[in-house]
Amino acid sequence: MRKTLLLLVALIMISCGEETTPKPKAYLSLEYPELGYNRLNMDKPYRFDVAKSATIKDLPKNWLKIQYPKLKASVDITYRPIDNNLKELLVEAEKLVLEHTVKADHISWRDFSNKENKVYGKMCEIAGNAASQIQFHVTDSTKHFMKGSLFFYIKPNYDSILPAVEHIKKDMVRMMESLQWEN
């Protein structure tokens, strides 16, 4: 009986230490680079500022993949010329956002307008474990239509990626604000 009591006391004493739990692999350990921008220097029908910390992958059809390797994310830029199909392009862009309603906790829209550069559009923020947390579309209403979507290379866990979303959102806003169409 005495040995059992001593064993029980010893187990209690050993188990009273600080408990450690390993962090799941899906959580990101992120370092945020200082904000700084360069002008996109490619033969495209558009120009905008891109974060210095990003790398740019040129794709066919005037599309781009703006990659954030340290954040394990990218902003995918799609471009389409307008050919009497502006309404179709706008509906398609908003439909792609609404496909996230299954996983989204909340979707908010913000209108954007830069009359000087003839850039008009919307930015959408999607809260929750959706595949894309921020999307935007912009147009000059006559020739050009561009869409940008933020994606992470992991299964989305909104609470974990929220700081990275907020960081890249600043870059996406800068893209919209600095956008100029090439004629």
Image (cartoon, rainbow, N blue to C red):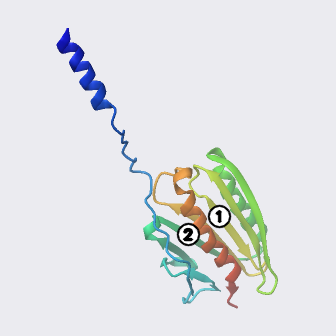
Q: Which residue is drawn at 64% across and 44% down?
A: 102
What residue is rendered at 80% in x and 87% in y?
116
Q: Earlier in the sequence, mark 1 or mark 2?
A: 2
Quadrant hosting residue 94? bottom right
Q: Where residue 179 sits: x, y (%)?
A: 68, 82
Give the number of the disc on residue 178: none
Q: How crowded is mark 2: few (under 14 residues within 10 Å), some or many (20 or more)?
A: many
Residue 80 appears left or right of 25:
right
Q: What element carries label 2?
A: strand
- When the figure is inspected, residue 141 is found, relative to residue 162, above or below; the finding is below
The number of numbered discs placed on residues in the rendered structure image is 2
Q: Which amino acid does label 2 sit on?
A: Val
Please tell me in which quadrant of the rendered image residue 4 appears.
Answer: top left
Evaluate whether residue 85 shows in this view.
no
Which quarter shows the C terminus? bottom right
- Closer to us: 127 or 88: 127
Q: Residue 135 carries which label?
A: 1
Q: Give percent across and percent down for residue 23.
A: 39, 48
Badge 1 amino acid:
Gln
Few, some or many residues within 10 Å of mark 1 (<14, 14–19, 20+): many
Identity of the residue drawn at 59% across and 86% down: 44
Q: In which quadrant is the N terminus drawn?
A: top left
Q: In this view, does 73 lie to the left or right of 136?
A: left
Provide residue 126's location: percent of width, then percent of height. 66, 55
| Residue 172 visible somewhere in the drawing | yes
Q: Name the residue under label 2.
A: 75
Of the pair 73 and 148, the residue shown nearer to us: 73
**Residue at figure coordinates x 72%, y 67% from the top left:** 89
Q: What element carries label 1?
A: strand
